[in-house]
Image (tube, rainbow, N blue to C red):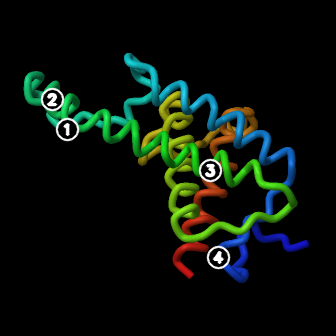
Amino acid sequence: MTSELFTSGRGGHVLHLGEDERALLSRLLGELREVVTDPAPGEMASRLFPVVHPDLPDQEAEYQRLTRSDLVSSRLGALDVVDGVLSRQGRTVTMDEAEMMSFVQAVNALRLVLGTALGVTEDDDVESAEQLASPQYQLYAYLSWVLDAAIRQLSG
């Protein structure tokens, strides 16, 4: 067994993930699906559906009207793909390039939602040992590690 999360194999990118980790990601993806499909998701989804015209409410409403359904469809499509990948049997699963891109999109969305809930910004450095030890920050760090590994795998 490799200590790497991803390796290259015949037919694509090989994900090495135990049952517990698969179950965790599947559960989180289900929760993310609820956030994405909520017609009024509020702050939790603010990073998933960014505001582009904060000072122009009419233009922002029009932008959201024109783009939101496409963003929701794209996110749900990625979640469906990753659900399918995670449901495959075996400790390793091979993903093609499109599945890998969906995996990256889904894990990134999970990180964005959790980071929003934790109040993490791009500038934040977690400084206190209490923050570092909290289960939410541990999960955030885990998702960051998974995302980093997936991006490195795609980058070759």
Mark 4 and mark 1: span between their CA atoms? 36 Å
Residue type at numbered disc 4: Gly
Regarding mark 1 in the picture, which secondary structure is present there?
Answer: loop
Residue type at numbered disc 2: Glu
Q: Which mark is residue 12?
A: 4
Q: Residue at (60%, 65%) from the top-left corner?
A: 150
Regarding mark 2 in the picture, which secondary structure is present there?
Answer: helix
> Of marks 2 and 1, which one's residue comes earlier in the chain?
1
Q: Give residue 103's position: percent from left, percent from top.
A: 58, 55
Q: Which mark is residue 60?
A: 2
Left or right for 146, reference 123: right
Q: Are marks 3 and 2 in contact (CB under 8 Å)?
A: no
In the image, residue 14 above or below residue 64: below
Q: Residue at (55%, 73%) from the top-left corner?
A: 154
Q: Which mark is residue 52?
A: 1
Q: Are marks 2 and 1 in contact (CB under 8 Å)?
A: yes
> Of marks 2 and 4, which one's residue comes earlier in the chain?
4
In the image, residue 32 above or below residue 85: above
Regarding mark 3 in the picture, which secondary structure is present there?
Answer: helix
Q: Which mark is residue 102?
A: none
